[in-house]
Image: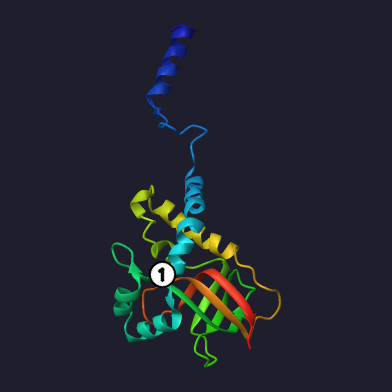
Amino acid sequence: MTRALLAGLLAASVLCGCKIVQKAPGAGAGAAAPADMVGQVVADTYEARLLPHVAQGAVDARELTAAIGQGLDAAGEALGARAAGGGAWNFLAKGEGTVVGADRESRAAVLEVDLDGDRAADLQIQLGPVVKGTALRDASPFYVFTDFKDQIEFAALARALNARATEALALPEGDLLGKRVAFEGAFALRSGSDPIQVVPTRLALEDAP
C-alpha cells in the first residue's frame, strides 16, 4: 500500500467519526449572547415600564398584610398576580414603617420593618446583593416566558431585575434602627405563613419623629 493511499484511508476514517455542525444564522461574532439579550431587555424596560408599573399598581402594605391574613388565595385573586401554571402569588406593595431590625453584613442583607407601630417586624426589605425570588419579573405582565429562549434565560431575567433594583439603593452608613422607611416594590408568597420579603424599586429613609 502506497503512503498516499494510506493517508487517504486515515483521513476518510476520521471524517466518518465526525459530526459537521453548521452555525445558525447570526451566530457569528456579532450575535448577542443570552446574557447580552437579558441585559438589553432590562435596559429597555426597567425604567420605562417596570418602575411606572410598580408605582401605579402598588397596594398599601398594611392592606395587603391584612388581606393575606384572611386568606392568601383570596388576597391574591383580589390584589395580586400569578404566573401562568400557578405557583406563588405576586404582589406590588408600597408603605411606610419603622426599621426594627437590620442585617447589613450578610450577602442577603435585609431591613426588618414595623408597619403598625407594635415594634414587631411585619416584613423584610431585601438589600442584596443576594436577592430571593422572582416577584419583580412575575408581577409584571410584559415579561412573558415565551418571549425567551428557555427557562434558564427567563431565570436570568429575574436575577438581572433584582440586581438592577438593589444596585440602585442608596443607604446611609451607620445604625438604621428607629429610622422611618418609605418603599415600593414586589414580593411573592406561596403560603400565607411565609415571611414577606420585598424587592424594593424605591427606598427612602429618614429619622423617626
Residue 191's x, y, as percent?
A: 36, 78
- Residue in view at x 37 percent, y 23 percent: 16
Residue 55 in the figure: left or right of residue 192: right
Farthest top residue in view: 2
Provide residue 83's location: percent of width, then percent of height: 33, 64
Tell me residue 15's x, y (percent): 41, 22
Identify the image's colour scheme: rainbow, by chain, secondary structure or one colour: rainbow
Q: Which residue is mark 1?
A: 57
Q: Is residue 164 left or right of residue 191?
A: right
> Please, what secondary structure does the residue beneath circle 1 have?
helix
* Left or right, 45 with reference to 87: right
Q: Is residue 172 above or below residue 23?
A: below
Q: Is residue 105 above or below residue 162?
A: below
Q: Residue furthest bottom?
A: 118
Alpha-carbon neighbours of circle 1 within 10 Å: few (<14), some, or many (≥20)? some
Picture layout, residue 125 above or below residue 67: above
Q: Nearer the viewer, residue 177 or 44?
A: 44
Q: Residue at x 65, y 81 (%)?
A: 176
Q: Residue at x 51, y 46 (%)?
A: 36
